[in-house]
Amino acid sequence: MTRKERAADAFAEVEIELIAISRWMYENPEVAFEEVESSLRLAGFLADNGFDVSYPAYGLRTAFAALAYNNVSTLRQQFEQGDRVHGIIERGGVAPNVIPAITKSSWIVRAATAGRFEELGGKVEACFEAAAQASGCDLELEYTGKSYIDLITNPIMAQIFAANSNALGRDMPTQAELDTPTAASSDMGNVSHVVPSIHPSVAIETDSVNHQPEFAAATITASGERAIRDGALAMAHTIIDMAEQDVWDRLTIE
């Protein structure tokens, strides 16, 4: 397929949207270089279709700049199961009509395994480097904190803990048994590469998820206190069973 044919196909996919914008402009004329709503609709259209849009731009409130490749968003098309990249803009400028001399953003990269984390991290860095080169900016990368690596769950310990949790009235399915496996970042993953480990989770009664004030409030309710007690008891009973069954020689890091 030629480039012109690819362009024609790309246009066909968004033709209806473009016609709708054109008709709106016709029915709602803006004059005297005050095409604010029109430019806003065009900028929104580009942003919805994968462009990295700066609006307003160049000191004009009706102008916008669109980069053909929003690099990280494009990279998401190649993400594997478990890949996560989160970013926020910490410093993006002080006025809408001034191009900032310095910008700053903060990013987190996550992956299912340590090997994949290194691979994905390199790809994300390449996104930043390409953006800097394309815009003529200098790039400075600062790495903070220590990387967490994937958790290795010891099957023997997990089986004993699940039995003790079930005995307390709490079903403890494995990741493989969950319809939607969960994942999080913790230095417990680093520990599990050194000594046999488990990292079970005990549920509390709440409609919210962690990292929210509502979830924090739920931890000090009767349900939250019961979860602390049951989790502690299940862990203590697991240690007792491991000692009584003398499983130490069978514990390995796999």
Image (cartoon, grey):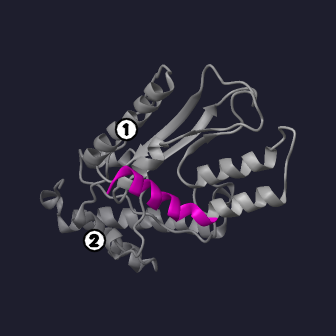
First-in-chain label (1 vs 2): 1
The amino acid type found where label 2 is placed reads Gln
At which x and y percent is residue 96?
A: 75, 31
Q: Nearer the viewer, residue 203 or 25?
A: 25
Looking at the image, residue 96 sits to the left or right of residue 109; the answer is right
At which x and y percent is residue 57?
A: 69, 32
Read off the magenta span.
Answer: 1-16
At which x and y percent is residue 29?
A: 84, 52
Residue contact between numbered discs 1 and 2, judged by CB atoms under 8 Å: no
Res. 167 visible in picture: yes
Looking at the image, residue 10 sits to the left or right of residue 104; the answer is left
Q: Nearer the viewer, residue 141 or 95?
A: 95
Q: How many marks?
A: 2
Res. 218 visible in picture: no
Residue at which label 2 appears: 159
Residue most extreme to the right: 32
Is residue 177 positioned above or below 122 on the image?
A: below
Is residue 46 positioned above or below 14 on the image?
A: above
Is residue 251 positioned above or below 53 on the image?
A: below
**Main SS of the magenta segment?**
helix
Q: Quadrant of the N terminus?
A: bottom left
Q: Which mark is residue 241?
A: none
Q: Residues within 10 Å of mark 2 (few under 14, many from 20)?
A: some
